[in-house]
Image (spheres, grey):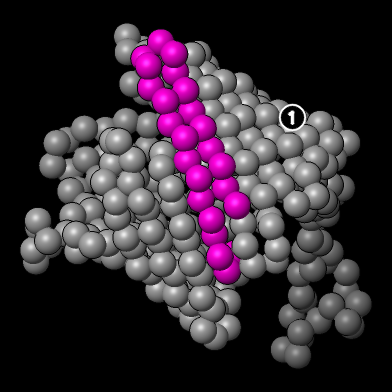
């Protein structure tokens, strides 16, 4: 406290004015701000293993499938899906309509049985987004067969979200980057009708000169553990593996690969239950894609082969 009797320290009434020096925040606060500014956004917990999942999920179907997409305007498009059927599934047809711009996306599909699927994605500013998915069926007139609503927040170093599902299921999740290569998070849920609650913790690590290594881990309160690893060998080759363990239930393990050629993408998956899957998507011309897929399991004697054509592909 400065009690000097200089004229500049006196108030208009003549009383002395006390001058209290402000504390120096020091270099630690500035260093922490710079460290937080360098942290990346980890993505949502729902997309924890997005890189591995993209390789480990080949588009496998049985029978013949044809898809026709027609863009009517920059914001409106229609699509027709025809499935010719197989030994296990009958033939079907789906009609879809999509409307979207930079902030809102509305998509819907209806099949020959009258089952309607719809979803709405809305972006509120740079940080908040909302998603709504619903399904209605003639078997349940006047009510939604399924309903899911999500609210997501995207910060500079974190992602948080809240979920509601029809039937009374509430959930919340959070992912936070703590270093430039490591992010941790967790989720919890509560069922209001069944009074069941649970949760999970998760971690995601990404390292390498260009972030070509990604490893994730997730452990739940019901004894479930999920591990994944993805390696980007080059711009054209990717490898991934995943293990899922559910206590006293089952344990699955899979290895997948992806080859991106100039006009084609090939994916393959080998699982611990002896199931082998593969898919090929080739761009014949700018508006047409050819799809081939196959899956076999000699142990279960289960075989699938699919052929598809997409016209009007993006």
Q: Quadrant of residue 115?
A: bottom left
Q: Residues within 10 Å of mark 1 (few under 14, many from 20)?
A: some
Number of labelled discs?
1
Q: Is residue 311 magenta?
A: yes
Outermost residue, right direction? 6
Lateral position of residue 140 relative to residue 166, left or right:
left
The answer to whether residue 106 shows anywhere in this view is no
Q: Secondary structure at mark 1?
A: strand
Compared across the picture, whether 161 is left or right of 86 comes to right
Is residue 299 among the parts visible in the rendering? yes
- Is residue 247 toward the left or the right of residue 263 in the image? left
Q: Residue at x 47, y 23 (%)?
A: 296
Q: Is residue 132 above or below residue 47?
A: below
- Between 160 and 211, the one nearer to me in the picture: 211
Report the side of 62 relative to 267 (left or right): left
Q: Position of residue 91 (x, y in %)?
A: 29, 51
* Residue underneath mark 1: 231
Quadrant in which the N terminus is drawn:
bottom right
Residue 187 image-quadrant placement: top left
Type of secondary structure dominating the magenta stretch: strand
Query: Can you say whether 195 is above or below 142 in the image?
Result: above
Magenta residues (range): 290-314
Where residue 37 sits in the image (x, y, percent)? Answer: 77, 53
**Whole-percent x, y for residue 295 in the image:** 48, 28
Name the spot of residue 109 as percent of width and height, x first: 34, 65
> For the point 79% across and 60% down, which residue is it?
22
| Residue 294 included in the magenta stretch of the image | yes
At x 71%, y 47%, the residue is: 264
Quadrant the C terminus occupies: bottom right
| Residue located 37% across and 31% down the image | 199
């Amino acid at each position: 406290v400065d009690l000097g009797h200089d004229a500049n320290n006196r108030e208009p009434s003549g009383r002395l004015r006390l001058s209290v020096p402000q504390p120096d925040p020091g270099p630690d606060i500035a260093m922490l701000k710079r460290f937080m500014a360098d942290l990346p956004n980890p993505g949502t917990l729902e997309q924890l293993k997005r890189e591995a999942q993209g390789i480990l999920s080949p588009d496998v179907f049985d029978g013949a499938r044809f898809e026709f997409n027609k863009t009517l305007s920059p914001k409106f498009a229609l699509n027709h899906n025809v499935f010719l059927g197989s030994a296990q599934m009958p033939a079907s047809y789906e009609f879809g309509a999509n409307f979207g711009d930079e902030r809102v996306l509305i998509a819907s599909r209806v099949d020959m049985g009258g089952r309607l699927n719809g979803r709405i994605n809305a972006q509120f500013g740079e940080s908040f987004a909302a998603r709504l998915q619903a399904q209605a069926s003639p078997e349940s007139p006047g009510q939604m067969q399924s309903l899911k609503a999500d609210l997501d927040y995207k910060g500079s170093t974190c992602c948080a979200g809240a979920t509601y599902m029809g039937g009374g299921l509430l959930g919340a999740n959070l992912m936070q980057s703590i270093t430039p290569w490591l992010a941790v998070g967790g989720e919890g849920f509560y069922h209001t009708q069944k009074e069941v609650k649970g949760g999970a913790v998760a971690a995601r690590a990404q390292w390498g000169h260009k972030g070509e290594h990604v490893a994730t881990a997730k452990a739940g309160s019901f004894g479930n553990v999920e591990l994944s690893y993805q390696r980007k060998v080059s711009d054209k080759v990717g490898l991934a593996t995943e293990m899922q363990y559910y206590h006293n239930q089952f344990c699955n393990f899979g290895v997948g690969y992806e080859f991106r050629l100039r006009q084609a993408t090939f994916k393959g998956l080998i699982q611990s239950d002896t199931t082998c899957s593969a898919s090929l998507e080739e761009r014949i011309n700018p508006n047409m894609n050819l799809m081939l897929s196959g899956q076999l399991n000699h142990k279960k004697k289960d075989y699938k082969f699919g052929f598809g054509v997409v016209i009007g592909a993006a």
